[in-house]
Amino acid sequence: MADPSKLHAMINARCPHCHEGRLFKYKWWNLLNFTQMHENCPHCDLRYEVEPGFFYGAMYISYAFTVGIMLFGGIIVFNFFNDPPAMGYVVPITIFSLVMVPFNFRTARVIFIHLFSGISYEQESINS
Ligand SMILES: [Zn+2]
């Protein structure tokens, strides 16, 4: 059962339960604080870390993203920089991977909490 508001909530990094409250405290371009999440949903008070260490699982998704990012970078370098020697790959791909860290980290957590937490959407879910 795919509902369109779930995709919308994922793109906007919102709570998987109410689709309203934000998951993260700051915007992704806040490079010192982009990893900080709310402990509980500001809207419905759902606790995001459903069990201790829950978000460690997001590292598997993050790992897959990193592989994809590095493959993509490798293909770009190969095609547009005429297959340079090894350092011609290492330097740009490392920089590209680092630039993608905020996206990678947050998207992995959003996907993980939305698809693997077992939390389902309820339209009127205000606990307090
Ligand atoms: Zn919520």
Image (cartoon, rainbow, N blue to C red):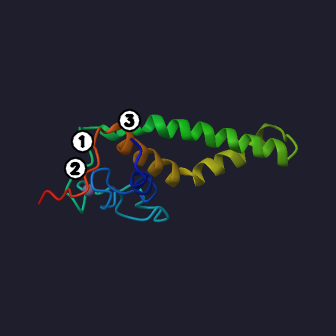
Picture residue at 31% right of the left edge, 39% below the top:
117
Residue toward you, 50 or 66? 50
Which labelled disc corresponds to residue 99?
A: none
* Ligand 1 sits in quadrant: bottom left
Q: Earlier in the sequence, mark 3 or mark 1?
A: 1
Crowd band around label 1 with a 10 angstrom C-alpha radius: few (<14), some (14–19), many (20+): some
Picture residue at 78% right of the left edge, 37% below the top:
86
Residue toward you, 43 or 37? 43
The correct choice, above or below, for 93 with respect to 126 in the image is above
Q: Which residue is mark 1?
A: 50
Which labelled disc corresponds to residue 57?
A: 3
How much space separates mark 2 and mark 3, taking CA atoms? 17 Å
Picture residue at 76% right of the left edge, 46% below the top:
76
Say what amino acid the circle numbered 2 marks.
Arg
Counting from the top left corner in percent of width and height, residue 17 is at 27, 51
Counting from the top left corner in percent of width and height, residue 6 is at 39, 51
Q: Which residue is mark 2?
A: 47
